[in-house]
Amino acid sequence: MTPIVFPGLGIEVTIDRVAFTLFGWPIYWYGVIIACGFLLGLTFSMRQAPRLGLNPDDLLDMMFAAVPCAILGARAYYVIFYLDLYRDASGAIDWGEVVSIWDGGLAIYGGLIGAVLAAAVFCHLRKLPFFTVADCVSYGLLIGQLVGRWGNFVNQEAYGGPCTAPWRMGLTAGGTYIEVHPTFLYESLWNLLGLVLLYTLVRPRRRFDGQLFASYVLWYGLGRAWIEGMRTDSLYLFGTGIRVSQALAIVSAAAALAVILRTLRRRKTDPKPLYAERVRDAQDAASETGTDQPNREENKEKE
C-alpha cells in the first residue's frame, strides 16, 4: 500500500485495496464501490419510475439483464483497445487476466453500450416504451458513475497528467512519486452537477420521451471529452493518436444535441403527450367507466 496525498490540502490517506475477505476470497473496494453506486442509482431511478408512468418492478427486472451485459460490454471495450496488456510471454491471450475484472479495467462507454442494447431487447419483449425507460435510468447512470469513480481512486488509476493546482493528487506510480490531476474526482463532480441539472432543470421542462436520456448523453459527453484529454491511461484507436473515449464522447454529445434540437422543433408544430400523460389519461378514463386499469399492451397500442 502506498499513500495518496493531496499536498495542497494537507490530506493523506492509505487505503488497502482489499475491503474484506469472504470464505478466503478477497473482496476489493473497487467492486464494493461499484456495487454501492449501482444500488444507489437503481433505488433513485425506481423511486422516479411512477412519475414517468412506469412500474418500478419492471425496472428491477430489467436490471437482471442489463447489469451482466453492462459488465461484459465494459470489460470487452477495455480489453479490445488494450489487448497487449492481456497477452502472455508467448503473445497468446491470457484469458485468466481477461476475466480478472476485480483488478480494474472497465470502460464506462462499453458498459453503456452493453446496457442500452440489453434494455432495448428487454423493453421490446415486455412492450415497454424504451425512451421513457431510458429517461428514468439516466438518473441512475449519473449516480452510479459519480460514485463508481471513487473505485478508481482506491485503485490509484484514471488520473491525469502533472498538476500544480492546490487540489493536485500525489501518488507513487512505478516507484516514482508524482503529482497529477485527480481526473476521477473531476468526472465524479461533473456527474454530480449533471444529476442536479437533469433533475432540477430538464425534468420539469421535459417535452418528449427520451429528452432526459439525450440530455444525459450530451452532458456526459461534454465532460468526458474534456476530462479524457487530461488522462494518461486513455485507450487509443489501434495505434493511432486518437483517444477512443474522447472521440466517442464528442460524437455522442453532438448526436444528442442534434436529437434534442430537432425533436423540440418538431414538437412545436406536432405536440405529442408524454407516455406518463397517456398512462394517466387511460387510468382516469378507466376509473370513470369503472373498468380495470388498462394493461401495458393497451397502453402500448395508444402510443
Image (cartoon, rainbow, N blue to C red):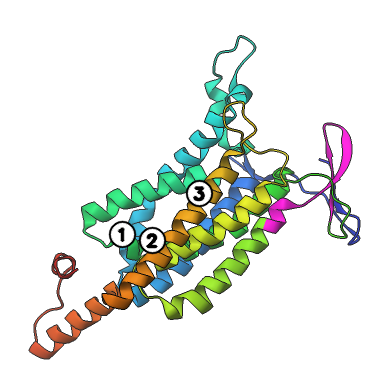
Q: Please name the residue that numbered disc 3 is placed on.
A: 251
Relative to 63, is 89 on the left or the right? right
Looking at the image, do the residues carrying marks 2 and 1 touch, with CB atoms under 8 Å apart?
Answer: yes
Pick whichever of labels 1 and 3 is earlier in the sequence.
1
Residue 81 horizontal/vertical position (percent)? 56, 31
Name above or below for residue 107 compared with residue 291: above
Q: Residue 217, relative to residue 241: is it above or below?
A: below
Q: Can I make out residue 135 in this image? A: no
| Circle nearer the viewer, 2 or 3 | 3
Disc 2/disc 1 C-alpha distance (Å): 6 Å
Mark 2 element type: helix
Q: Quadrant of residue 107?
A: top right
Q: Is residue 270 above or below residue 68?
A: below
Is 70 a magenta residue?
Answer: no
Q: Residues within 10 Å of mark 3 (few under 14, many from 20)?
A: some
What element does badge 1 sit on? helix
Q: Amino acid at mark 2?
A: Ala
Q: Amino acid at mark 1?
A: Phe
Query: Which image quadrant: the N terminus?
Result: top right
Q: Residue at x 63, y 36 (%)?
A: 103
Magenta stretch, residue numbers? 168-186
Q: Which residue is mark 1?
A: 130
Residue 173 forms part of the magenta stretch: yes
Write down the residue under mark 2: 134
Q: Earlier in the sequence, mark 2 or mark 3?
A: 2
Return the x and y of residue 6 as percentages of the image width and height: 86, 55
